[in-house]
Image (tube, rainbow, N blue to C red):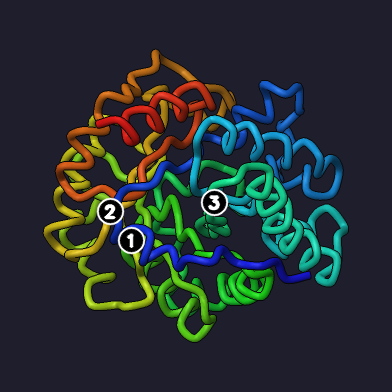
Amino acid sequence: MATTPSTTPLAEALARGPLVLDGGLSNQLVAQGCDLSDELWSARLLADAPEQIEAAHTAYVRAGARVLITSSYQATFEGFARRGIGRREAAALLGRSVELARRAAGRVAREVWVAASVGPYGAMLADGSEYRGRYGLSVAELERFHRPRIETLAAAGPDVLALETVPDVDEARALLAAVRGCGVPVWLSYSVAGGSTRAGQPLEEAFAVAAGNDQVVAVGVNCCEPADADGAVRIAAEVTGKPVVVYPNSGEGWDARARDWQGRPTFDPARVGVWRAAGARLIGGCCRVGPERIAELAELLENP
């Protein structure tokens, strides 16, 4: 069932000033006692415990988030099929991801936008390859993979599609081709390391694919080291002239083999001033950044 989009288009809201994104959905679900060891990760809960997903979204909206990203990052027709879930049920679960975020958004009086997450091809593989890219598939093959999920999510009525954690330029091109004509604005967000995409392309080249594309309302980075976001925000703004989206990880590193986080957190909400000055308009956190940090970001953005 389609949900009702927010009254104000996201692009118009961004022209007025910055908005706070939510934080990592998975870490909040773990904090709520959920087991995410399955290959479907948080997407499994769309079928098994949707109330937990709604509760996680609610924690972020109560912390001050103005944009909620759905639990569809790792939700794909192929991934659900491996669990014996047919296409009709899988489509319903994708739609449910938008509905759950919309319900949580309705728990506060202020306007909250819903971004339907479209993760990279590697997220479906559940082997860490979304942090490498270069899957051996052509742009056309990647477009064919992404299009059915994008069409299903768009039909559910989100305010924007979050094309996120994209590891290389080829997949970005495929995603932008797949969303053409879907009727929903998008943001494009790369996962980066240093001054390059995870696949090693310069960020200037990566962001250039979105320049001049009116469907893209923001471009930037997520699921990266906080320090790597500083330069990326500046480059994204300079290359595209668009509002920038930035939501890095806590700074800890994900060990795909051990399926655990390593190292110490380096996420500092005080960076918001640097990001905002460089052009960031959608600012939040990704993995291991919880409601407490989002509340700090919200406070800093509302009282700069």
Is 21 drawn above or below residue 36 in the view shown?
Answer: below
- Residue 41 lies, in percent from the top left, at 68, 40
Q: Nearer the viewer, mark 2 or mark 3?
A: 3
Of callouts 2 and 3, the N-terminal one: 3
Tell me if 13 is positioned left or right of 207 in this view. right
Label 3 SS: loop
Determine the residue located farthest toward the top in the rendered image: 264
Q: CA distance from mark 1 to mark 2?
A: 5 Å
Numbered label attached to residue 168? none
Which residue is denoted by mark 2 in the rendering? Answer: 244
Residue most toward the front? Answer: 109
Say the numbered circle drawn on residue 112: 3
First in sequence: mark 1 vs mark 2 = 1
Please name whichever residue, 6 or 237, is drawn nearer the observer in this view of the structure.
6
Q: Residue at x 59, y 71 (%)?
A: 150
Asked if residue 117 shows in the view, the reply is no
Residue bearing the label numbered 1? 218
Query: What residue is at 33 percent from the left and 61 percent from the top?
Result: 218
Residue 176 placement (x, y as % from top left): 41, 74
- Give the residue type that dot 3 points to: Val
Circle count:
3
Which amino acid type is shown beneath numbered disc 1? Answer: Ala
Q: Residues within 10 Å of mark 3 (few under 14, many from 20)?
A: many
